[in-house]
């Protein structure tokens, strides 16, 4: 399902996560939770000075913000370009909020630079 066709998640599901966010992030939370509950995202990673690379991200879904999400992302349909990241659900939903903001700005589904730094363990 594409980001524009997502319907806001059930308020009961959103309310569990709402203490973790403020301002415009909290306003985007119903769509981000809907995206999270989908369990996957197809997008395209923009490469500065190069061709964009398609990716498929998938993750396990849980209803509790403190549970862990394991996100797997594969680039260009190539198993050798697969990466995995485990983080708290509320942190992952925060990255999905950024995906939504990025989509609204560029019409491309892509994670933030911060997400990729964490995925590739640049900040470890």
Image (tube, rainbow, N blue to C red):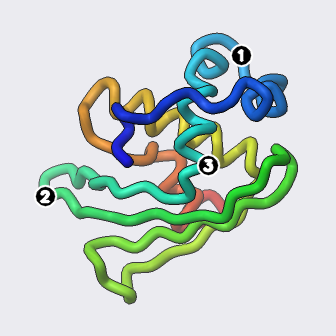
Q: Earlier in the sequence, mark 1 or mark 2?
A: 1
How far is disc 1 from disc 2 in space, using C-alphas?
A: 35 Å
**In the image, what residue occupies the spot 52% across and 65% down?**
58
**In the image, what residue occupies the spot 63% across and 37% down?**
33
Compared to 70, does 47 lie above or below?
A: above
- Left or right: where does residue 46 sit relative to residue 79? left
Q: Which image quadrant: the C terminus?
A: bottom right
**In the image, what residue occupies the spot 52% across and 67% down?**
120
Q: In the rendered image, which residue does mark 2 sit on?
A: 50
Answer yes or no: do the residues labelled 1 and 2 have beta carbons within 8 Å? no
**In the image, what residue occupies the spot 49% across and 59% down?**
40
Which residue appears farthest toward the bottom when viewing the image?
80
Residue 80 figure quarter = bottom left
Residue 41 figure quarter = bottom left
Rendering coords of residue 86 (x, y %): 70, 65
Q: Is residue 54 or residue 17 the one in the foreground?
A: 17
- Left or right: where does residue 108 sit relative to residue 71? left
Q: In the rendered image, which residue does mark 3 sit on?
A: 37
The mark lying in front, picked from 2 and 3, is: 3
Answer yes or no: do the residues labelled 2 and 3 have beta carbons within 8 Å? no
Rendering coords of residue 102 (x, y %): 37, 32
């Amino acid at each position: 399902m594409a980001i524009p066709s997502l319907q806001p998640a059930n308020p009961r599901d959103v309310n569990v996560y709402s203490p973790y966010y403020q301002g415009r992030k909290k306003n985007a939370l119903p769509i981000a939770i809907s995206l999270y509950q989908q369990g996957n995202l197809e997008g395209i990673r923009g490469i500065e000075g190069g061709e964009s690379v398609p990716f498929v991200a998938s993750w396990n879904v849980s209803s509790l913000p403190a549970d862990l999400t394991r996100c797997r992302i594969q680039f260009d349909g190539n198993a050798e370009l697969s990466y995995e990241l485990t983080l708290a659900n509320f942190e992952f939903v925060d990255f999905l909020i950024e995906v939504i903001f990025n989509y609204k700005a560029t019409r491309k589904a892509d994670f933030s630079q911060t997400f990729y730094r964490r995925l590739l363990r640049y900040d470890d």
